[in-house]
Amino acid sequence: MTALETFKTLQSSDFGRFLGGLDHLLCAVMELGHIAGMILLLASVLLTSLNLLGLGLRNVPLAQIERSTARLFWTGLALLVVSGLLIFIPAATSYYPNDFFWAKFVLLGLALLVYLTLYRRVAAAESRGALLAKTTGGLVLSLWIGVAFAGRFIGFF
Ligand code: HEM
């Protein structure tokens, strides 16, 4: 099954048509859920990345910031996935030709990969070289902000 056929199947499914028939107020609630999820996730990413970049909370060990903000990250991501799918499913085929939609998911895949591999290893290390810390902090921050911008640009193109 091609991506377009999958999108068509999702949109024309009973659930897709149910979502498509919902009141606009509920759609606005899903958008708000998406923005709230993004604020939680980016708050966590910002605090840990600024620490790695040596720009914020320099006297607080990264492991402590990571422990305090991990729940923000995962709650934010869960909210983004659920609200994003509820926005996506009833209008799936309209996103298929949108380059920013695809760019967003390539960036999202890269952001998750770097977060779950390089960032995790650097955050867990007792000590880390300044160059590795700054590179990791800059990469993590740029990828997640890139996802957010691509998400915003979807509506403009
Ligand atoms: C599986 C995960 C996700 C799905 C399925 C998803 C899906 C969507 C969809 C369908 C839209 C609406 C686009 C439009 O019609 O204008 C959207 C908008 C957006 N997304 Fe996501 N998204 C996901 C994850 C994320 C993440 C991780 C971020 C940020 C870190 C993000 C940030 C945004 C932003 C900023 C918008 C624009 C919101 C607005 O204009 O009101 N999304 N997303």
Image (spheres, helix red, strand yellow):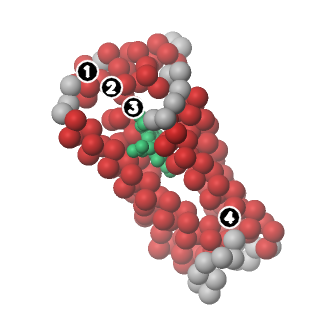
- Which residue has dot 3 on it? 88
Q: Are marks 3 and 2 in contact (CB under 8 Å)?
A: yes
x and y percent of residue 149 in the render?
55, 46
- Local SS, label 2: helix
Residue shown at 38% from the left, 15% from the top: 9
Specify the label residue 90 is tagged with: 2
Specify the label residue 50 is tagged with: none
- Which residue has dot 4 on it? 137
On the question of residue 112 being in view, the answer is: no
Residue type highlighted by circle 2: Pro
How far is mark 1 from mark 3, CA to CA? 12 Å
State whether residue 115 is above or below residue 29: below
Q: Image quarter for residue 104? A: top right
Residue shown at 27% from the left, 38% from the top: 27
State whether residue 76 is above or below residue 97: below
Q: Which circle's residue, 3 or 4, is located before the other in the chain?
A: 3
- Which residue has dot 1 on it? 17
On the question of residue 103 being in view, the answer is: yes
